Image: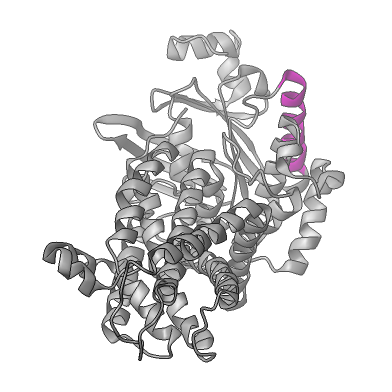
Amino acid sequence: MTTDALAIDDVSHSFGRVQALKNVTLNVPPGRFTALLGVNGAGKTTLFSLVTRLYDNSSGAIRVAGYDLRRKPSQALARLGVVFQSRAMDADLTVRQNLAYHASLHGIGRRDASDRIAEVLGQVGLSEKAGDRISALSGGQQRRAEIARALIHRPDILLLDEATVGLDVKSRAEVLALTRRLIAENGVSALWATHIMDEIQPDDDLVILHEGQVLRRDRASEIARGKGLTQAFLDLTGVAPA
Amino acid sequence: MSDIPFPPRAWITAFLGIARRETLRFVNQRGRFLAALVRPLVWLFIFAAGFRAVLGLSITPPYQTYVLYEVYVTPGLVAMIQLFNGMQSSLSMVYDRETGAMRTLLVSPFPRWFLLASKLVAGVVVSIIQVFTFLAIAWFWGIRPPAIGYLTVLPALILAGLMLGAMGLFLSSAIRQLENFAGVMNFVIFPMFFASSALYPLWRMRESSTLLHDICAINPFTHAVELIRFALYAQVNWLSLAVVLGCLAGFFGAAVFMYDPAKGLWARRKGGG
């Protein structure tokens, strides 16, 4: 039996009296692209904050590559690559400096980091931008740099929280295609949070999250069967998707 | 933290990475370096010169003789550099949190106390560079402590810098928005600086108000100043050393608590989508 790249079991989370997540259970099998679909406010970012340990999961269990996040936080976090919804790189530093910083935060020495930076920048097509400051990059290039940063320590799973937000249509398509290609090339899994229906392909695993609850999880083609994904989402949530 | 999957060398790598980033940011922000120098120099060149005739000083340890006001005020200005540097670090932490850059740090597999301590130490190194630049300029202005003082002051600078930086870390965890930082200046930095022995000795305070004297005497910044003042003359003020160590432990412990995902600030913050 293979270990899931990510297993979330019966996780709930509240902010005061507001319950943001209710008994969420989902898994990301190894090597799979799993889409987490939900409208704004569905709880996607809260779930990501729990998985990345920005918040503490006080109920249920989260395991990354088999490591329990509460009992083995370092082992679990070492296997996560994260692309946050908003910019998480230092705009005043160059792409290379940012990646070197991130590599050091994973204990990767300078020589190994240098090789790895060249490799991941090549993968995301930013080799020639290595010496440019983040603030000088376009939105799409910044996203690609973030993906390179997330890959630098060879994670088992990539978490991408609304990674295409704020990008134009062309850049959005490029970032999505790049992510899918990198996942295939690097053999990592991905949990792709989005509110955009077009970003999901029939072969993807799909989790529909609404008002903090998982309403459905299956292969996207299964959920869409007979009526299409848009109608299926509408039937489940009562809300029209983007 | 038995689950840390890294050898000791990786910890050093992580620390050096954090220190390198802080240094790069410092180098990129030359205005910050200049501001950190100009502030105490204005006090030394203008304020101290103006008050030299007004403020009489009796012989008070660690001085063996009467000293000029500029000489008295120099350790206070050194501590001022470290105080402002600590607050600058705090400001950059709040900024990083608002822009999202801090999440990169916090999702590192290294424990948070280690990440925060690394950031703290890196900030202190930057402040010590500023301090020695200031002391070099002050030397040309005639402020010349014994040569050994430049060496013996180093441990005091490290401890005072760590304490003030830890205080900044703690404050950064409590400040929710960048806009609130002005409040910190008004309610923390200025009262701490003025209600201390940085500008005038405590006996002078007692002449004006016993209550004010007592407030100054318990102010941790007073003890940072006195630790530096004594160390600059190759002496140890044991009381100040104890207070600075105690406050360092307290502030750092509070900062680690506040940055803990299960407690403090992060537990209270609400996410987006």
On the image, the x and y values in percent for residue B175 come to: 37, 45
Q: Position of residue B50 (x, y in %)?
A: 42, 62
Query: Against B125, is A70 above or below?
Result: above
Q: Is residue B46 left or right of residue B221?
A: right
Question: In x, y percent, where is residue A114?
Answer: 78, 62
Q: Is residue A72 visible?
A: no
In the picture shown, does residue A192 fall above or below A100?
Answer: above
- Using residue B111 as the reference point, say whether residue A30 is left or right of it: right
Which quadrant of the structure image shows residue B9?
bottom right
The quadrant of the image that shows the C terminus of chain A is top right
Could you tell me how many numbered marks the image carries?
A: 0
Magenta includes A170?
yes
Overall secondary structure of the magenta stretch?
Answer: helix
Quadrant hosting residue B218: bottom left
Instruction: Name the residue at 43% across, 80% down.
Output: B156
Can residue B248 be seen in the rendering of this structure? yes
Residue A24 at what x, y percent from top left? 40, 35
Splitting the image into 4 quarters, where does residue B250 fall? Answer: bottom left
In this view, the residue farthest toward the left is B210
Q: Residue furthest front?
A: B53
Give the residue drawn at x 45%, y 84%. B232
Side of A241 relative to B54 (left or right): right
The span picked out in magenta is: A168-184
Q: Residue at x 52, y 63 (%)?
A: B41
**A186 magenta-colored:** no
Q: Is residue B71 above or below residue A17?
A: below
B102 and B210: which one is in front?
B210
What residue appears at the point 52 percent right and 47 percent down from the top-left corner? B103
